[in-house]
Image (cartoon, rainbow, N blue to C red):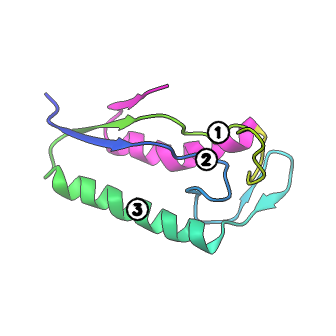
């Protein structure tokens, strides 16, 4: 039985104003993206949150519920994308979420 649940939402991977892996990475089209100072700070808080989750769950199993918007997609009239290429957005989300899925032992639930 799982009595600990960590809830996240609205990651919007692919937005210049959203959480992003902290290091330069290659885009699908061959270019590179360097995360901004704000994105590096958000990533620092992201890591702190997961350390808190591990501490708060006191070693017991926990589940993760992602309430959606993992990718930024192509919001109406958006001008702030790292890339509108879904392969890039998916890779950013994967880099952020794969370690979390591992941490929670695969007890990851994603709401559309």
Q: CA distance from mark 3 to mark 1?
A: 20 Å
User: Do callouts 2 and 3 mark residues in contact (Cβ within 8 Å)?
Assistant: no
| Residue 15 placement, left or right of 109 | right
Q: Going 78% across and 52% down the picture, which residue do you hit? A: 79
Q: Going 77% across and 48% down the picture, which residue do you hit? A: 83
User: Do callouts 3 and 1 mark residues in contact (Cβ within 8 Å)?
Assistant: no
Which class describes the residues within 10 Å of circle 1: few (<14), some (14-19), or many (20+)? Answer: some
User: Do callouts 2 and 1 mark residues in contact (Cβ within 8 Å)?
Assistant: yes
Q: Magenta span covers which residues?
A: 86-112
Label 3 residue SS: helix
Q: CA distance from mark 2 to mark 3?
A: 16 Å
| Residue 68 placement, left or right of 49 | right
In the rendered structure, find residue 47 and report the number of the disc placed on it: 3
- Mark in front: 2 vs 1: 2
| Membership of 88 in magenta stretch | yes
Which class describes the residues within 10 Å of circle 3: few (<14), some (14-19), or many (20+)? Answer: few
- How many marks do you count on the picture? 3
Is residue 41 depicted above or below 94 in this figure?
A: below
Where residue 66 sits: x, y (%)?
A: 41, 36
Quarter of the rendering containing residue 77: top right
In the rendered structure, find residue 25 and report the number of the disc placed on it: none
**Dot 2 corresponds to which residue?**
13
Label 1 residue SS: helix
**Dot 1 corresponds to which residue?**
90
């Amino acid at each position: 039985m799982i009595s600990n649940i960590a809830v996240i939402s609205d990651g919007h991977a692919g937005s210049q104003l959203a959480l992003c892996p902290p290091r330069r990475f290659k885009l699908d089209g061959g270019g590179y993206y360097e995360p901004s100072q704000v994105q590096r700070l958000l990533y620092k808080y992201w890591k702190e949150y997961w350390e808190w989750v591990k501490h708060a769950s006191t070693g017991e199993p926990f589940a993760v519920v992602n309430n959606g918007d993992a990718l930024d997609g192509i919001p109406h009239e958006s001008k702030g994308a790292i890339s509108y290429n879904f392969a890039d957005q998916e890779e950013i989300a994967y880099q952020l979420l794969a370690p979390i899925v591992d941490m929670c032992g695969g007890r990851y639930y994603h709401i559309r």
